[in-house]
Amino acid sequence: MELVFVTEARFVKNRLGDYYADSSFNYELWNRYLESFSKIAIMARVKRDDDFRANSSLLSSGKNVSFIELPYYIGPLQYFLNLRKLKKVIKQTINKSNATFICRVPGNIGDLAIRCLINKNKNYGLEVVGDPWDVFARGSIKHPLRSYLRKISYNSLIYNVQNASAVLYVTNETLQKKYPVRSNTFEISASNVNIDDSLIAVDPKSHSFKNEYQIISIGSLAQMYKSPDILIKSIRMLKNKGINCKLIWLGDGDFKEDMEFFAKELNLDNDITFLGNVDKIKVREYLIQSDIFVLASRTEGLPRAIIEAMSVGLPCIATTVGGIPELLDNAVLVPKDNADAMAEKIKKLIEIPEFYNEQASLNLRRSHNYKNSVLRDKRKQFYQYLINLRN
């Protein structure tokens, strides 16, 4: 059985025909589906760059993987300019394909594919990985149509879930409550993030008093969803209190230069380093070298970065959005857009060894729930249910 996987992710194709994306959409991800499907075709936006080269860990193409290339766009305006072409490719694919369809939502491309699938009376599965109501919340994105886009995206996800044949949620209960399935619809929870069993640390990080503490955060800077501005303000507050922290940010995007300038404005250019995108091996190395992981997000599904930090035994601080409260202890959660509260939590971890060690140990224990061996069976149930509908 073949699979068509519909995603909002963006890919780059070079003259050799190699496709690249960030590490979340490399070939390793497709192996997850190829355990149940003979082939997978990725329906996504593709940009052509003949000379593009990247680390092999970002390579997305490979054996039994093909791509259904959609016009490349960024943002609502370019989306509407390409809408006719997008609909044409999606309609042609769905009309001629006998494959199983899985759409990862929320996202415009998923919305278009699902409308077409429903019109053709075809079954489809959903992977619900985020909450558009949070994505388009005030402060998360700047756009004159933000409020309108928020309502449209929210209602679309409700509709998509209600009409799906099977739904996989990345949270245990958060997204399920807000976007419930109809009665008798197959549903299951399984994080889209999994940790190789061998990469989970044996022992948690242990507190030690030092002259300088390394904070780490990970996230795309294509939008301001991860609130780098809030974390930068928190670092400034900590330094004002005599607590010397250095921040390393992993992730790239259009707002990277703005955030570097903002850090410089607050006289933190020697204390905050934006390293851009790094491969997953380097990500783990930086996590191991750090003292505290912080995620100041304004919107989330179930963040990969937190689970990876938990797996190396790091204490974490994060906001109360999306599925984050399912991961972390309430004692380390703060409201979004609250730099003061975030600074206070960081200060508490630094100054109270017992609190630091308790959170590090708790995180490491909980990370075992996201081992590949635990999640594989849940995903296979989801895939098999959809396969059975085709037989």
Image (tube, rainbow, N blue to C red):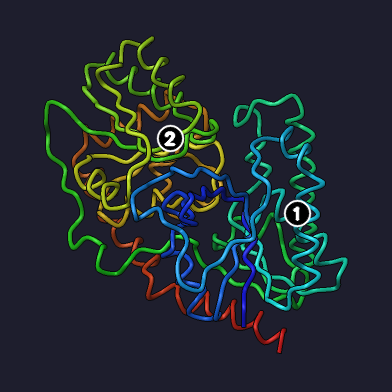
- Name the spot of residue 290 as percent of width and height, x first: 22, 40
Horizontal side of 25 relative to 270 (left or right) equals right
Is label 1 in a helix, a strand or a loop? helix
The one nearer the camera, 314 or 142, is 142
Q: Is residue 310 above or below residue 373?
A: above
| CA separation in Å, label 2 and label 1 | 27 Å
Q: Is residue 96 above or below residue 247?
A: below
Image quarter of residue 287:
top left
Q: Residue at x 34, y 66 (%)?
A: 368
Callout 2 touching callout 1 (CB < 8 Å): no
Q: Residue at x 23, y 33 (%)?
A: 214
The one nearer the camera, 208 or 245, is 245
Q: Residue at x 49, y 63 (%)?
A: 191
Give the total number of marks visible in the rendering. 2
**Amino acid type indicated by mark 2:** Asp
Residue of label 1: 111
**Amino acid type indicated by mark 1:** Asp
Image quarter of residue 82:
top right
Tag of residue 252: 2
The one nearer the camera, 74 or 133, is 74
- Placement of the N terminus among the 4 image quadrants: bottom right
- Name the spot of residue 238 as percent of width and height, x first: 30, 21
Q: Is residue 160 above or below residue 379?
A: above
The one nearer the camera, 44 or 304, is 44
Q: Residue at x 20, y 44 (%)?
A: 354
- Name the spot of residue 251 as percent of width and height, x first: 40, 38
Tag of residue 260: none
